[in-house]
Amino acid sequence: MISSEHTDLLLRVATNVGRKFAQRYPAMEAEDVSSEITARALEEWKTFENKLNRASEHGRTEYEVLHLLLSQRASKYCGEQSYAYQMNSAQAIYTPMEVRALLREHYYNPDSWVTPGKDTEHGTAVHHKGLWANLADIREALNRVSDKAHDHILAAYGPEDLGLPEPDRWSVDRAVAAVTRELNRHLNKVNTPHEGPGGRRTISNADSNYTTRKQG
């Protein structure tokens, strides 16, 4: 049986973890992630509680331990949902981390743009740690973001001989997020309930499990 103190802590940490992972996985809704990991935590609460009770032995707070445990569940859940969506829809879902790597490793590398035959549209695809991306798609995404975002990307990842001043981290993060949104524009067309990640539930597993436990 979960105590009221731990219930409050669980809901607070789950909300924060849900927001964090929704930023990493654009196809996911923060509330859905929070709901799912809360449900999983309740199902494993005896294990969770034992680890929380020993937090001080490892020089950690209960918040820190619970944040780690919920982040582990969120990572697994978001990865599974993202993979399932891509397999079912045959459409890629890009994350800011992946887009950052593609920009850093490939987009401004002339060798990446070498295309076979008479491909004048530079329709070549590049591969980075399990992710395939078409350079033409990245170029289109860059063309759709603001001039400021484009300039930050160019300064951060473009040729060093341009001599552009290094932009601050937050400006680059916002610019990468803007490019990621453009690459994921197809996600905005998914409006059917329960079609892929982010589909709303009538009642969440977390609410159902919590209510059941409270009544028990």
Image (spheres, rainbow, N blue to C red):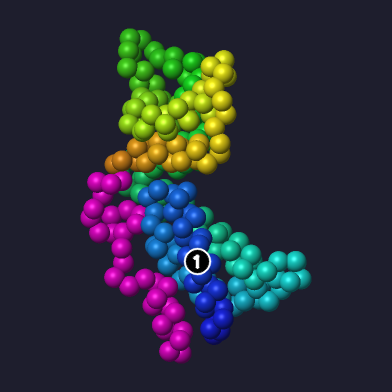
Examine the rendering and report whether any part of residue 42 can be seen. Answer: yes
Q: Position of residue 21 (x, y in %)?
A: 48, 54
State the residue in front, 46 or 200.
200
The residue drawn where x is 55% and y is 74% is: 9
The amino acid type found where label 1 is placed reads: Ala
Q: Residue furthest bottom?
A: 216
Q: Residue at x 56, y 78 (%)?
A: 6
Q: Is residue 124 above or below residue 40?
A: above
Q: Quadrant of the N terminus?
A: bottom right
Task: Answer few, some or many: residues within 10 Å of disc 1's Cα (few below 14, many 20 plus, some between 14 and 19).
Answer: many
Image vertical order of residue 32 relative to residue 22, above or below: below
* Secondary element at image label 1: helix
Toward the top, the furthest residue is 118
Front residue of this view, candidates 209 and 63:
63
- Side of 125 relative to 76 (left or right): left
Depicted 5 relative to depicted 181: above or below: below
Residue positioned 56% across, 25% down in the render: 165
Coordinates of residue 127 in the picture (x, y in percent)? 48, 29
Tell me the quarter of the picture where residue 114 sits.
Answer: top left
- The residue that appears at 31% across and 41% down in the rendered structure is 185
Extent of the magenta region: 187-216
Check if residue 166 falls in the magenta segment. Answer: no
Q: Is residue 97 left or right of residue 182?
A: right
Q: x and y percent of residue 73 in the render?
A: 52, 61
Front-lying residue, 5 or 36: 5
Q: How many marks?
A: 1
Reply above or below: 121 against 207: above
**Residue 210 on the magenta segment:** yes
* Quarter-of-image position of residue 28: bottom left
Q: Which residue is mark 1?
A: 14
Q: Is residue 40 visible?
A: no
Residue 68 point in image, percent of width and height: 60, 61
